[in-house]
Structures are given as structure tokens and as C-alpha cells.
């Protein structure tokens, strides 16, 4: 299933927040992304419909196994691309912002080639 960029951003955000705390609320997502709570509710509802996110009895969001797999992939792209750009001399803020844009559009083939290159040339350890 192919998500739009915004859906991927929500998955990645829930993943990143869930690494810090097990209780991810809608307001946490809204604060992290700078969106309104109604916008977050609507978007997360669409991800729930896709079977990527669940909401527990206390109102906390968590990724389903399928959602977590997608989110990890998106997050890996983000971190690897950020590192690549920083290794090229781009400042951290710009590298992070640019990686965030590129991560949603780069092909699997190109991303795998970047990872292979970085592993071979010492820029990536895992």
C-alpha cells in the first residue's frame, strides 16, 4: 500500500514519539508536527482505516505491526539521508529538512545504492 507523504509523516512521527514514551496522544502528534488536533484526528483516522495505527482504551495511539514496519522504513530513510547530507558538509538543520523531503520520493533502488555506498565508504555502520 502506498501512502501519500503526509501519511508517511504521521507514521514516522508516531514511531519517533513512541521511542520516547509508550503513551502517544493526538496532542503530542499535533505539537510535534505543528498541526491542529482536528487535522491530526482526521489523518490518524485514515491510518487506522488502513490498519496502520490503533487507538487504545485510554486514547493513546500505537502502530500496528504493518504500521511499525512502514514507519521504521521511513525513519531509516530519514536518518541515512540526513547522515549522507551532513557527511557532504550540509549543516544539520538543512540536512534534516532536506532528508525529510527526499525520504518520501526516493526509489528503493536508489536508497539501497546510497546505503551500500555509505557502508562501503565508512559513513554507515548498520
Image (cartoon, rainbow, N blue to C red):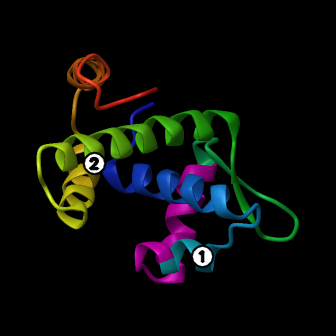
Quadrant of image for the N terminus: top left
Labels 1, 2: front one:
2
Query: Do callouts 1 and 2 mark residues in contact (Cβ within 8 Å)?
Result: no
In magenta, the rendered stretch is 32-48
Principal SS element in the magenta part? helix
Q: Report the residue marked by disc 1.
A: 28
- Chain-order first, disc 1 or disc 2: 1
Return the residue at label 2.
82
| SS at mark 1 in the image | helix
| Residue 103 appears in the figure | no
Distance (Cα) linking label 1 and label 2:
24 Å
Tell me the residue at 37%/45% (across/down): 79
| Residue 56 seen by the camera | yes
In the image, farthest residue toward the front: 122
Give 2 or 72, whichever is nearer the viewer: 72
Q: Position of residue 80 (x, y in %)?
A: 33, 38
Q: At x 28% / y 48%, what residue is drawn?
A: 82
Is 125 left, or right, of 100 in this rendering? Answer: right
Q: Residue at x 57, y 42 (%)?
A: 50
Magenta residue check for 37:
yes
From the viewer's perspective, tell me whether residue 61 is left or right of residue 83.
right
Where residue 92 sits, quadrant-wise, is bottom left
Picture layout, residue 99 above or below residue 108: below
Q: Residue at x 23, y 26 (%)?
A: 107
26 left or right of 86 in image:
right
Seen as rendered, the residue at the extreme right is: 57
The percent position of residue 111, horizontal first and vertical second, equals 26, 26
Taking depth in this image into account, of 55 and 109 the one nearest to the observer is 109
Amino acid at each position: 500500500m502506498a501512502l501519500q507523504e503526509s501519511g508517511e509523516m504521521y507514521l514516522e512521527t508516531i514511531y519517533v514519539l513512541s521511542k520516547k514514551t509508550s503513551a502517544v496522544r493526538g496532542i503530542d502528534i499535533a505539537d510535534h508536527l505543528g498541526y491542529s488536533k482536528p487535522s491530526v484526528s482526521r489523518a490518524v483516522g485514515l491510518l487506522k482505516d488502513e490498519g496502520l495505527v490503533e487507538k487504545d482504551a485510554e486514547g493513546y495511539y500505537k502502530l500496528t505491526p504493518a504500521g511499525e514496519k512502514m514507519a521504521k522504513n521511513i525513519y531509516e530513510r530519514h536518518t541515512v539521508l540526513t547522515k549522507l547530507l551532513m557527511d557532504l558538509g550540509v549543516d544539520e538543520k538543512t540536512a534534516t529538512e532536506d532528508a525529510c523531503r527526499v525520504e518520501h520520493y526516493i526509489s528503493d533502488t536508489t536508497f539501497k545504492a546510497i546505503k551500500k555506498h555509505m557502508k562501503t565508504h565508512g559513513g554507515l555502520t548498520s
